[in-house]
Image (tube, grey):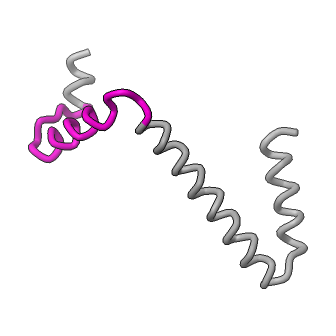
Amino acid sequence: MNTGEIRQRIQEYVDQLSPERLLVAADFLAYLAEREDNDATEELLNIQGFKEAFAKAKNNVESGKVVSVDQLKRKY
């Protein structure tokens, strides 16, 4: 079953739910989305040296030590 078919099935189920059950479904979907975000963040934080590189990049942005996309396009 592909993603489109799964979404269609979910929509069919959603259309059958009472307002109270829709709230429960919305809460559950929000939980799953948050969990997905947390898993992705955890994966990044587990990369050796990521925290340090991210902090350095953040400092560079804050201090204006960046190159615009337009400058990169002209250079390459």
- Residue depicted at 70% across the width and 66% down the height: 28
x and y percentages locating residue 15 in the rendered image = 86, 71
Q: Quadrant of residue 55?
A: top left
x and y percentages locating residue 66 in the rendered image = 16, 35
- Residue depicted at 83% across the width and 39% down the height: 2
- Residue depicted at 52% across the width and 50% down the height: 38
Please state if 44 lies on the left or on the right of 67 as rendered: right
- Residue depicted at 37% across the width and 27% down the height: 48
Q: Quadrant of residue 3?
A: top right
Q: Quadrant of residue 75?
A: top left
- In the displayed structure, 55 sits above or below 17; it is above
- In the displayed structure, 58 sits above or below 14; it is above
Please state if 15 lies on the left or on the right of 48 as rendered: right
Magenta segment: does it hold 58? yes
> Quadrant where the N terminus lies?
top right
Magenta segment: does it hold 66? yes
